[in-house]
Amino acid sequence: MIKNISNLGDAALYCDFGNEVNKSINSQVIKYFKTIKEKKFEGINNLTPSYNKLIISFDLKKTNFKEVKNYVENINAQDSKDINSKKLEIPVCCHENFSMDIKRLEEILKLSREKILENFLNKEYFCYMTGFIAGMPFLGDLDENMRAQRLETPRVKVPKGSVALTEQFANIYTFESPGGWNILGNTPLDVFDSSKEDKPNLINPGDTVIFKEITLDQYKNYNEQ
Amino acid sequence: MSNNYLDIIRPGINTTFQDKGRDHLYHIGIPFSGAMDNRNYLIANKLVNNNLDSAVIEFAYQGPHIKYSGEKINFAVTGDVIFSIKKKDTETEGNCYESYQIENGDEINIISTNKSVYGYLALGGEFDLKFQWNSCSINTKANIGSNDGKKLDAGQRINLKKINSNKDTKKTNYINTKIENIRVIKGTNFDYFSEEGKKIFYEKEFTVSKLSDRMGMRLEGPKIDNIVNTNIKSEGLIKGVIQVPADGNPIIMLSDHGTIGGYPKIGVVASVDYDRLVQMSPGSKIKFKEINLSDAETLFKLYEMETQNLLSQI
């Protein structure tokens, strides 16, 4: 359930479902997201579900905070049909060309490179949400001993395909973009395809992802196969 | 093939097609995009008798130099922009907020924006562009929109599908006002910052950094000290959100912003000030002033009425 609704600026609602990150809270967020999305309330122009928050933005020319808040408070969020979830294998190359933050991770986690990769690869991660940049999946949960904070100053450019870690999560940079996560490797796979307007994301909330290591040669040849 | 087209002689620094943008896509990571300065975008279209949601060419700092081929067409430039119109043997300086008619072989040379960032070039007609999710707005980070989601480039040809039959030229006396303070509403993590940090945020000047673009505006100045946590669990963002990462330098989310972020939100720019915020060029000084939600709503209503008034007078 929504614990609190406040305003984020003058054109968005900030719905708080709690502070913990787990599948049960996340599925509440998704439930509200899907219900509101289907109802198409006049003036709501975007919904952003995340681990435990739902941000509802609206067109201030058509409605306002009070109206949208009242609407959301009185909505009967329906259990959505089970998300059609997939299990996906994502190839990742952790060669030094790509693992830009491996040294930083070794220092913070006090683990060797080999141990970090062993902990990270061949495990199942759950996709909580997608976003930041188009199609970027937020995957969890990393083992306790693999959790590092973001970089103090985000990089202006993170290369496309970067597989990166922060706290209990992993993600994939679907495009070159600014970003502050710790970069561990790179995937040659296209995780976002804008030509598919109805289904541009390879990974969607509810999917399971496993990272499989590939060599630099395999990486280079990946898109030529 | 179209008989009416533009050839790009020089593209300018960051020249893209923009329209009203695309909505209902935050949940997959796609921002609104659309014209950065919405008011100037609308005025540009109105001056050339276009529908108000038509695509225009947006440029930053230096604009494009183009050569037109085809039947007579109107164009207008909005913003604070220096440009010239070259016809056969004469080159004359053009005025913003005034539409002109050009014909086969004429050139428009947009030299620069003046102490501002964005300007708009509208042509009286319809560009032949690809739409993605009901918008041709170019998002260069995700390569979405017309022109394969890329900035315009030298040597490119852009076709027009249609030219407006209404060729009345128009003029308005709009002046882009600068504002001293950017008004903000307290953010959801305001209490993450020290008393000193909060004071700095509202009382000190910040400088717009060179590392600013359609995604975000980075600011430099006194550091804003966080006393709770320099990270939050990643959550949704909207344009205008001011995040403060661990280094204490605020970043304001702009139209091509990431849809999710993990830095604490100290404030959100009031919608009324967004058009003017994006026009602040690197080196400009910014001061923030707190307002409450109801004042922000009223001010936006007034701003919107003023925009509609301006448009109705054209």
Image (cartoon, coloured by chain):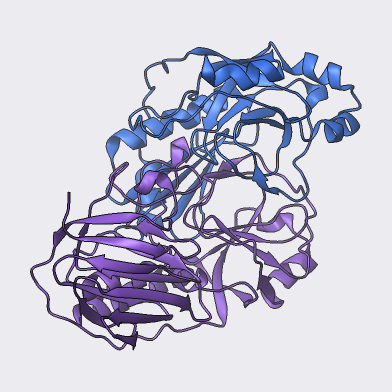
The tally of labels here is 0
Q: Colour of chain B?
A: purple
Horizontal and vertical percent position of residue B207? 68, 73
Whole-percent x, y for residue A142 in the image: 72, 22
Residue at the extreme left: B165
Asked if residue B127 is positioned above or below residue A129 in the image, the reply reads: below
Residue at far front of view: B89
Please report the residue visible at 57 percent of the width from the left and 79 percent of the height from the top.
Answer: B181
* Residue B46 seen in render: yes
Q: Left or right: where does residue B256 sit relative to residue A80?
A: right
Q: State the image quarter where residue A147 is shown.
A: top right
| Image coords of residue B130 (percent x, y) | 28, 45
Q: Residue at x 41, y 15 (%)?
A: A84
Which of B12/B275 is in front? B12
Q: What residue is shown at x 76% (from left), y 24% (from top)?
A: A95
Palette colour of chain A: blue
The location of residue B212, given as percent across then percent down, is 60, 62
In the picture, residue A119 is in which quadrant?
top right
Whether residue A181 sits left or right of residue B107 in the image: it is right
Rendered position, B249 above or below B237: below
